[in-house]
Image (tube, grey):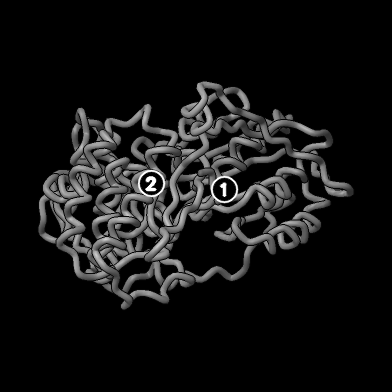
């Protein structure tokens, strides 16, 4: 039942399926769709091996709930709860209700995880509500909308888990702090011994109003070129835009490529077009494994993907690639691809990325036509490391480094590395 690969993170709302928000179906039709949803994940989801999820139990828990529903929104709510059972930020629906939690990382401005048992903010997305109200890394999360944080996290933990899993808690924490589509967040945070309330949505949901000036932005820092790739890796029009930006870099002494605002994934055509500028011979840049075939036959199916040089397009000077927790999906593939090319004087630099599992495939339910996606291919660095475990070669830990509010630590470290090459 293999579907077309969509190497893209769900953005939370697909205009193409808004046609049936008010259309209702019989319980039997909803049950048919749930069975299709459950079986698709059962047959093709490729990361059960590192989860504590009992997928058979998921069906036992959620299928009976369909007997009581009356509306599509109620059905969506059940599907959301069921897919949270695999606690995977790269799996979800591409529809939502007003009360749905926002998609991580695309729909959030805060990255958080449990450290030494405490829920801590580890990175904040620049230019959005969290930074504007003073939220910063290192703050401990106490409550969200007056609810103690651990109570809120409990609501998003898997009910089918065989054992406790810190990754499930981290997933639930990030889903919780992202908030939903209608309720402004009040986040109570502890810092330097004091607890204070923060209101990241006091000026509205800024994440819904995000607009980029262009697909690609360029500037020059002395003789060093800088290219920022915005969240359009799913759009093939990014290819000529990136090519035009690269043409401006002919006379630079080095280049910084900024991938810090690419959370929503994309496609490998765009990835290979970008990487193709930086190699003069064919090279492997990532490895794939299609798990369902191995599950069905016992025979592993894997392959390595090649990036090829592009005629008349080659940049051979020093390079730094910037990444953070909003470098997601195919952007993570591009980043590990740069690392795997083994270019001289090339570094990846930043925090851990979004750590999204694998390549997702898309599916459509037969009756409601609701789309859902989840990882069906495992992805690896060419050295065999799972992509989601990759750490940049120059690593930034904001819990240990506290730059001034006006500075960009990523750029500072990139410039320091490039200067060290002289």
Q: Is residue 297 above or below residue 310?
A: above
The label nearer to you, 2 versus 1, is: 1
Q: Relative to the observer, which residue lies in front, 196 or 244? A: 244
- State the SS at label 1: loop
Q: Are marks 2 and 1 in contact (CB under 8 Å)?
A: no
Q: Is residue 351 above or below residue 303?
A: below
At a point 83% along the width and 46% down the height, the residue shown is 310
Indicate the position of residue 205 as horizontal and vertical percent values: 33, 70
Quadrant assignment for the C terminus: top right
Q: Which residue is mark 2?
A: 89
At a point 52% along the width and 51% down the height, the residue shown is 260
Q: Relative to the observer, which residue lies in front, 374 or 210? A: 374
At a point 24% along the width and 42% down the height, the residue shown is 58
Q: Which residue is mark 1?
A: 5
From the viewer's perspective, is 276 left or right of 410? Answer: right
Residue 124 seen from this side: yes
At a point 37% along the width and 27% down the height, the residue shown is 49
The local crowd at label 1, few if under 14, some if 14 to 19, many if 20 or more residues have their Cα within 10 Å, is some
Q: Relative to the observer, which residue lies in front, 275 or 358? A: 358
The local crowd at label 2, few if under 14, some if 14 to 19, many if 20 or more residues have their Cα within 10 Å, is many
The residue positioned farthest toward the right in the image shown: 312
Indicate the position of residue 52 as horizontal and vertical percent values: 27, 30
From the viewer's perspective, is 74 left or right of 372? Answer: left
């Amino acid at each position: 039942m293999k579907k077309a690969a969509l190497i893209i993170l769900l953005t939370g709302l697909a205009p193409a399926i808004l046609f049936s928000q008010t259309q209702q179906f019989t319980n039997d039709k909803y049950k048919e769709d749930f069975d299709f949803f459950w079986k698709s994940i059962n047959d093709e989801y490729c990361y059960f091996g590192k989860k504590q999820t009992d997928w058979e139990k998921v069906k036992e828990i959620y299928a009976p709930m369909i007997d009581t529903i009356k509306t599509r929104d109620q059905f969506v709510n059940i599907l959301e709860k069921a897919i949270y059972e695999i606690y995977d930020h790269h799996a979800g629906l591409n529809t939502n209700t007003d009360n749905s939690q926002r998609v991580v990382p695309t729909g959030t401005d805060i990255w958080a995880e449990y450290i030494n048992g405490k829920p801590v903010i580890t990175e904040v997305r620049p230019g959005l509500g969290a930074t504007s109200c003073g939220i910063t890394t290192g703050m401990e999360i106490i409550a969200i909308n007056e609810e103690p944080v651990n109570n809120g996290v409990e609501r998003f933990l898997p009910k089918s888990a065989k054992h406790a899993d810190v990754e499930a808690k981290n997933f639930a924490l990030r889903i919780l702090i992202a908030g939903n589509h209608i309720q402004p967040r009040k986040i109570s945070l502890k810092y330097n011994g004091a607890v204070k309330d923060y209101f990241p949505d006091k000026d509205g949901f800024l994440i819904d109003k995000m607009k980029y000036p262009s697909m690609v932005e360029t500037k020059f820092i002395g003789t060093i070129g800088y290219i920022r790739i915005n969240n359009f890796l799913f759009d093939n029009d990014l290819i000529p835009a990136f090519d035009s930006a690269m043409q401006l870099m002919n006379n630079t002494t080095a280049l910084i490529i900024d991938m810090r605002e690419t959370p929503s994934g994309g496609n490998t055509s765009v990835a290979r077009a970008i990487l193709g500028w930086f190699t003069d011979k064919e090279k492997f840049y990532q490895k794939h494994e299609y798990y369902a075939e191995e599950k069905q036959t016992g025979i592993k199916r894997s392959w390595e993907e090649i990036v090829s040089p592009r005629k008349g397009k080659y940049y051979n000077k020093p390079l730094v690639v910037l990444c953070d927790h909003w470098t997601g999906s195919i952007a993570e593939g591009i980043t590990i691809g740069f690392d795997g090319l083994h270019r001289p004087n090339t570094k990846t630099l930043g925090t851990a990325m979004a750590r999204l599992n694998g390549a997702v495939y898309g599916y459509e339910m037969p009756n409601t036509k609701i789309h859902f996606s989840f990882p069906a291919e495992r992805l690896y660095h060419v050295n065999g490391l799972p992509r989601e475990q990759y750490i940049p070669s120059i690593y930034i830990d904001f819990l240990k480094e506290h730059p001034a509010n006006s500075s960009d630590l990523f750029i500072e470290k990139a410039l320091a590395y490039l200067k060290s090459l002289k």
